[in-house]
Image (cartoon, grey):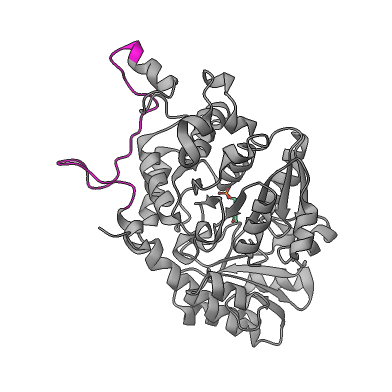
């Protein structure tokens, strides 16, 4: 059969039951797995044989769902993590260590900004933030000898800037490091970063992939394309023996296609234990089965709400890459011809106070620290998710104090607009 389309993969990829086996991915609710001999188990610990021994490292339910997400992104291997935060941390820490440096887009999720600029700084990992719209020269200038990764969000949460993935990937590759793209907002239904040169893709599956506000989770997908051995001096963790794993050299034993995810599983999952529960992986898969049906509706509602807000005199500005007036319109059309997501950011005249008063009046759109599920919700980032940032950092991330992020769910768009209208009234 020819390569399947995205919708078919959403429904069927990652799990093919044998004769008489469960049609739905079974929840393997077991911490451990039984073996007949110690020799059998020893082979697993040596990574000589594949199999399961302890759910902190790997679980069959999780692996089926990870395989589906890897297929959707067009990657060679994937893994689930307990959250999107864990996914981004693992993706970076798998190739960075004390003394490393990261180049990251300044327009990223507040939690990731904090992770990189505060928590990873405590581990001795430095970062240089660059504008998502930086010129090639500005990008090149950000790299150092100890740079080990470049990071950005395909559509940034909550600024809704669109990453020029091809140009970022080219810059990363000029400096011999991989580009990691957090693809949470568009999902692989609307954008597949690997097709544009990204090497590693991460997700907060908590958002559209789950889609129902039911389970926190994350995922990492490796393109299998980055040649670690060609830059062996930069990535000793992948290209020299791992003494904590019987001297295995991941890039030699598992090749370009398997090294990154195997190391993240065998080393980081073993030591940090940020595993997704099999129950949550099961719920995530239910969401994935309809992702390709839901995303177009989120896009339709997002565009309708953005166009409505743009016509209101109370609104200072609207950010939505699908709006013709958006500075990201052309870039969004190139990378996401079918639209990006259902999240719209807008700034009310009157700043923080006006935003608070307006949000109090909304009836359908609930105030939540969440985005990207079936129910419409909204948030003022400056007083919530991004409150740890200074005014200057907020400005650099494109987040004015009066910004409201509204995540358009799957309701009828006429009702969403009526809710906004009564709040303005
Ligand atoms: C929510 C989010 C995260 C963090 O994910 P959690 O599942 O909440 O840990 C990371 N990146 C983006 C773009 C997000 O929207």
Residue at screen point 73% across, 50% down = 103
In the rendered view, tell whether residue 110 sits above or below residue 137: above
Residue 332 visible in the shown view: yes
Q: Quadrant of the C terminus?
A: bottom right
For the stretch drawn in magenta, the main secondary structure is loop
x and y, in percent, of residue 318 in the image: 67, 77
Q: Quadrant of the N terminus?
A: bottom left
Location of residue 131 (image quadrant): bottom right
In the rendered view, tell whether residue 117 sits above or below residue 318: above
Q: Residue furthest left?
A: 20
x and y, in percent, of residue 212 in the image: 44, 57
User: In this picture, which residue range is highlighted in magenta?
Assistant: 13-39
Reply yes or no: does residue 29 show up in magenta: yes
Q: How many marks do you count on the picture?
A: 0
Residue at screen point 48% across, 34% down = 262
Residue 421 visible in the shown view: no
In the rendered view, tell whether residue 105 sits above or below residue 319: above
In the rendered view, tell whether residue 56 sits above or below residue 423: above
Location of residue 158 (image quadrant): bottom right
Q: Nearer the viewer, residue 372 or 260?
A: 260
Residue at screen point 49% across, 68% down = 409
Q: Residue furthest front?
A: 230
Left or right: residue 185 versus residue 73 is right
x and y, in percent, of residue 28 in the image: 33, 35
x and y, in percent, of residue 33 in the image: 34, 23
Reply yes or no: does residue 413 show up in magenta: no
């Amino acid at each position: 059969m020819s390569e399947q389309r995205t919708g078919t993969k959403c429904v069927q990829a990652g799990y093919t039951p044998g004769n008489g086996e469960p049609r739905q991915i079974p929840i393997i609710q077991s911490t451990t797995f039984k073996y007949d001999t110690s020799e059998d188990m020893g082979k697993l610990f040596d990574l000589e044989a594949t199999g399961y021994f302890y759910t902190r490292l790997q679980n069959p339910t999780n692996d089926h769902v990870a395989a589906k997400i890897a297929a959707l992104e067009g990657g060679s291997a994937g893994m689930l993590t307990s959250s999107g935060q864990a996914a981004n941390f693992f993706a970076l820490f798998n190739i960075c260590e004390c003394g490393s440096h990261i180049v990251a887009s300044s327009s990223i999720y507040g939690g990731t900004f904090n992770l990189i600029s505060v928590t990873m700084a405590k581990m001795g990992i430095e970062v240089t933030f660059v504008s998502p719209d930086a010129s090639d020269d500005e990008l090149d200038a950000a790299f150092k000898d100890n740079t080990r990764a470049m990071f950005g969000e395909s559509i940034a949460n909550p600024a809704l800037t669109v990453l020029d993935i091809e140009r970022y990937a080219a810059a990363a590759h000029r400096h011999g490091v991989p580009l990691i793209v957090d693809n949470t907002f568009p999902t692989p239904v609307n954008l597949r970063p690997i097709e544009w040169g990204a090497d590693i893709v991460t997700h907060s599956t908590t958002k559209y992939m789950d889609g129902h506000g039911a389970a926190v989770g994350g995922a990492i997908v490796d393109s299998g394309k980055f040649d670690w051995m060609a830059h062996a001096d930069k990535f000793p963790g992948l290209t020299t023996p791992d003494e904590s794993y019987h001297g295995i050299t991941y890039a030699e034993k598992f090749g370009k296609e398997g090294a990154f995810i195997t190391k993240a599983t065998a080393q980081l999952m073993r030591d940090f234990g940020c595993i997704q529960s099999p129950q949550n992986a099961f719920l995530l898969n239910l969401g994935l089965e309809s992702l390709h049906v839901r995303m177009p509706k989120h896009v339709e509602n997002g565009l309708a709400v953005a166009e409505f807000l743009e016509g209101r005199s109370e609104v200072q500005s609207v950010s939505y890459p699908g709006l013709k007036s958006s500075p990201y319109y052309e870039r969004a059309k190139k990378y996401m011809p079918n639209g990006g997501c259902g999240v719209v950011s807008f700034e009310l005249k009157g700043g923080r106070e006006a935003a608070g008063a307006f949000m109090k009046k909304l009836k359908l759109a609930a105030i939540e620290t969440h985005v990207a599920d079936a129910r419409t919700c909204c948030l003022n980032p400056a007083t919530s998710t991004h409150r740890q940032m200074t005014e200057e950092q907020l400005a650099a991330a494109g987040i004015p104090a009066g910004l409201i992020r509204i995540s358009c769910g799957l309701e009828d768009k006429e009702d969403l607009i009526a809710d906004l209208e009564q709040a303005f009234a």
